Image: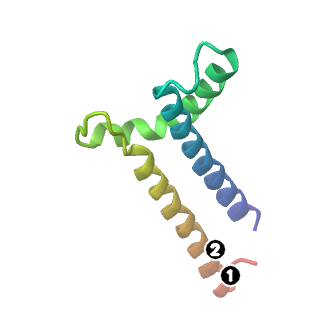
Amino acid sequence: MPLFFLLQAGLTLFFWAILIASILSLLTGFGVLDTRNRLVWSLCDFFYRVTEPVMRPVRNRMPNLGSVDISPLIVLLLVQACMLLVSAVQGYLIRGGLYF
């Protein structure tokens, strides 16, 4: 049980990190948040460093849509698919009697 719990918790935290990073990106892009503020810069930098290793390959494979970036949406869908897969594997192992 701890393995699947940790996987689900990690995927959930990563889901929220991507969501927060995309919201911070929008707010800084529209000028609502000022990155000259040290706290805002630290938050944006943290979420950028956490999410960019996953977002960059998705961005590189996507066609150029101008200023629209839908890579967070694609990554969020992939994270949701991984969460469903983890739940399905856990259920399969529980029903098979291999995991309790």
Task: Work out whether residue 80 or residue 32 is closer to the camera in this orientation and state it.
Answer: 32
Q: How far across and down, in percent of the image, does residue 29 sit? A: 46, 27
**Marks 2 and 1 close (CB-CB < 8 Å):** yes
User: In this rendering, would 5 be left or right of 53?
Assistant: right
Q: How far across and down, in percent of the image, does residue 8 sit? A: 66, 60
Task: Work out whether residue 87 or residue 30 is closer to the camera in this orientation and state it.
Answer: 30
Q: Quadrant of residue 11?
A: bottom right
Q: Quadrant of residue 96?
A: bottom right
**Dot 1 crowding, Cα within 10 Å, few <14, some 14–19, many 20+:** few
**Residue 90 shows which numbered tag?**
2
Amino acid type at mark 1: Ile
Task: Work out whether residue 3 or residue 10 is closer to the camera in this orientation and state it.
Answer: 10
Which corner quadrant holds the N terminus? Answer: bottom right
In the displayed structure, 28 sits above or below 81; it is: above
Residue beneath label 1, please?
94
Amino acid type at mark 2: Gln
The colour scheme used to paint the residues is rainbow
Query: What residue is rendered at 47% in x and 28% in y?
Result: 30
Query: What residue is rendered at 56% in x and 29% in y?
Result: 49
